[in-house]
Amino acid sequence: MKGIEKFKGKRILVLGLAKSGEAAAKLLHKLGAIVTINDAKPYHENPQAQQLDELGIRVVCGHHPVELLDDSFQLVVKNPGIPYENKMIKKAIELGIPVITEIELTSILSEADIVAITGSNGKTTTTTLIGEMLENSSKKPVVAGNIGTVSCEVAESVTKDDCIVLEVSSFQLMGTVTFKPAISVLLNIFDAHLDYHGTKEAYIQAKTKIFANQNEQDWLIYNDDDSNLVKAVQHSNAKKVPFSTKRYLSNGASIKNGFVYFKQEPIIHTEDILLPGNHNLENVLAAIAVSLIMGAKKEHIQFVLKTFTGVRHRLQFVDEVEGKRFYNDSKATNILATEKAINAFSDPIVLLAGGLDRGNSFDSLIPSLERVHTIITFGETSAKIKEVAHIAGVEKVIDAEWMEDAVLLAFQHANKGDVILLSPACASWDQYKTFEERGERFVQAVESLSVK
């Protein structure tokens, strides 16, 4: 690690635990900081807090006492999900105390170059693709961030011979000051997380912090088909590499005559790419650009694209049962992600959709339902989805209580050659703790079908 003296002796409040808070607290304690942890979950129900208490770290649990925070603190490291309206965050800002998220620690401490990926959709797929494409290249890839492994944990062990391939969210990027990746990737910007950011402008501002500190030695890969990004990247000092699925770009990654090109070199025929859907072509173009800049071999990139079947819970092929193909897209927690999933297929579809009701309408989903002949609905939004399904002329709309019921109903009403697609267009929290749990229940239900 570099910069290890930066935190020694400093009073730091870690606000909110979960994985990132726990990792940040342990690392800062190890670096000699005077750490206090504040988490809303009561101490007796909080094994993370108990473990950290045993390490000698001060723990305050069960509520957020504003009086805990005074001007003797020099830094607040907050869980990304905690909004800036939180009273502790407001107090810190009033006192002039910097408020960061743990990816800022990663940027400060990591000896390895960072490749950071963000966007409204496609982050996980692109991050995973880049990680696989960089295997056997000049630098060993270590995948981290929003994808699973906490990045500051990785920062402890990486060297200059590694690179961190880091999926980052707008929540994480808001809490950065000096964050500086060697390569930043901006996939797209859509209306998302406006309940957190307030406005689309604020959301874009958070996303574009990914390149705020880059200079002419760094690289910025961006979607040239997204007008919001084309406008935003004008302010970047990095070397810009665009990608497009709509037109050929001699200075970036694009498609011409059925081939993917990087600059003027053909890389692979689009028919040889296993991932379905035009939106995944965007992810592929971004991943190719990053990987070639980082020194990946063309032959290995081709191998990855010919064999990569998708990220778990993101248009993941699960199985084919009696000629009916099941896909798990549980990570589609918004309407746009579901639209893209539906449009990835040319065959008739049985759609499984529903979940947490955030108060939004599903009218924008109607044009994508043309090839959906049956919808199995579940969760709080069931009635809303049934309404738009009827407007769209979907033949059958059927209620299910749990995922196991939905899978069985979908199988019964599907025809040979159909795609059975779990793409909920909603968060999972009305019925399941995470979209991963929802997706695993889908996979298990499909596996039960295949052994009958």
Image (cartoon, helix red, strand yellow):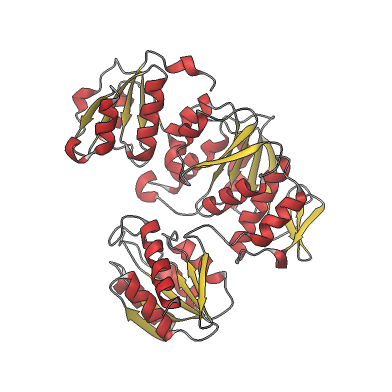
Looking at the image, residue 182 sits to the left or right of residue 389; the answer is: right
- Using the image, determine if residue 216 lies above or below residue 95: below
Question: Image quarter for residue 148?
Answer: top left
Give the tally of numbered discs: 0
Residue at position x 45%, y 74% in the image: 366
Where is residue 392 drawn, in percent x and y? 43, 80
- Evaluate whether residue 388 shows in this view: no
Looking at the image, residue 307 sits to the left or right of residue 406; the answer is: right
- Using the image, determine if residue 294 lies above or below residue 395: above
- Evaluate whether residue 50 shows in this view: yes
Where is residue 224 drawn, in percent x and y? 65, 51
Q: For the view shown, which residue lies furthest in the right direction? A: 264
| Front residue (pair 451, 53) | 451
Residue at position x 53%, y 29% in the image: 157
Quadrant where the image shows the C terminus: bottom left
- Using the image, determine if residue 361 lies above or below residue 283: below
Question: Image quarter for residue 161?
Answer: top right
Looking at the image, residue 293 sits to the left or right of residue 427; the answer is: right
Looking at the image, residue 86 sits to the left or right of residue 123; the answer is: left
Residue at position x 37%, y 27% in the image: 26
Where is residue 156 drawn, in percent x and y? 50, 28
| Front residue (pair 116, 255) | 116
Where is residue 420 drawn, in percent x and y? 47, 76
